[in-house]
Every structure is written in structure tokens, then in C-alpha cells.
Image (spheres, rainbow, N blue to C red):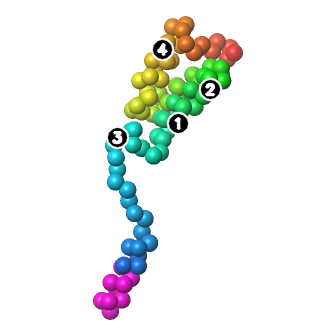
């Protein structure tokens, strides 16, 4: 009975996913975080001269992921846009 239990345990463990060591260094990450993806998306919109979408994406990043490593830069870009430089602010009528 013990042999059967040991064999079942060994079989179950062989099917379990292996966990990778967590590396806190962001330069060694294999996957982007949501903040990274939003930052890249905002840059893509800005390169395409779609400034309204770029700003909305930066605002979403700041609102939803305030601890993202890109949040301070996103806040700075939004503040710069509000001062008349950088990304234009949309008008009150949405245009």
C-alpha cells in the first residue's frame, strides 16, 4: 500500500508545473507587465500621431497602474501636454 501511495505521489509530482526562480530585476523579465504594455502602446500611438489615444493610454496607465515603473514618466508627459508642450490636450467638445 505504501509503495502504491509513493508511486502515485511521484506520478503526480512529475505532472506538476515547475516553478521558475523569481528575478526582481526588471531588465531580466521575460514578460511585460501591464504598465510596460501600456507605455509601449502609448509610444506607438504617439509615433502614429494619434495624440488623443496616446494621452488616453497614458492616463489609463497612471490611473490603473500607479506603481508601474512607467507611471512617473507618464505623469510627466501628461503634465507637459497640459502646459502646451508635447501631446495636445483634447478640446472640451471632444475634438
Q: Is residue 8 above or below residue 89?
A: below
Q: Position of residue 44 (x, y in %)?
A: 60, 28
Circle 1 crowding by C-alpha within 10 Å: few under 14, some 14–19, many from 20: few
Ranked by sequence position, the earlier of labels 3 and 1 is 3
Any magenta on residue 92? no
Any magenta on residue 5? yes
Label 1, secondary structure: give it: helix
Q: Quadrant of the N terminus?
A: bottom left
Q: Quadrant of the C terminus?
A: top right
Q: Which residue is mark 3?
A: 25
Quote the CA–CA distance across marks 2 and 1: 12 Å
Q: Is residue 52 above or below residue 15?
A: above
**Rendering quarter of residue 42:** top right
Q: Position of residue 48 (x, y in %)?
A: 66, 24
Nearer the observer: mark 4 or 3; the answer is: 3
Label 4, secondary structure: give it: helix
Ranked by sequence position, the earlier of labels 2 and 1 is 1
Label pair 2/4, CB-CB below 8 angstroms: no
Query: Which label number is shown at residue 79?
Result: 4
Quote the CA–CA distance across marks 3 and 1: 17 Å
Residue occupying the point 60% across, 22% down: 46
Nearer the observer: mark 3 or 1; the answer is: 3
Quote the CA–CA distance across marks 3 and 2: 28 Å
Ranked by sequence position, the earlier of labels 2 and 4 is 2
Is residue 80 found left or right of 88 in the rendered image?
left
Q: Which residues are magenta?
A: 1-9
Is residue 24 found left or right of 29 in the rendered image?
left
Ranked by sequence position, the earlier of labels 4 and 1 is 1
Our reading of the magenta stretch's main secondary structure is helix
Amino acid at each position: 500500500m505504501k509503495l502504491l501511495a509513493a508511486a502515485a505521489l511521484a506520478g503526480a509530482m512529475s505532472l506538476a508545473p515547475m516553478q521558475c526562480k523569481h528575478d526582481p530585476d526588471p531588465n531580466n523579465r521575460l514578460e511585460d507587465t501591464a504598465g510596460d504594455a501600456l507605455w509601449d502602446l502609448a509610444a506607438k500611438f504617439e509615433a502614429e500621431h494619434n495624440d488623443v489615444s496616446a494621452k488616453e493610454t497614458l492616463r489609463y496607465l497612471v490611473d490603473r497602474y500607479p506603481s508601474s515603473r512607467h507611471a512617473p514618466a507618464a505623469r510627466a508627459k501628461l503634465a507637459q501636454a497640459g502646459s502646451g508642450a508635447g501631446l495636445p490636450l483634447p478640446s472640451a467638445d471632444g475634438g
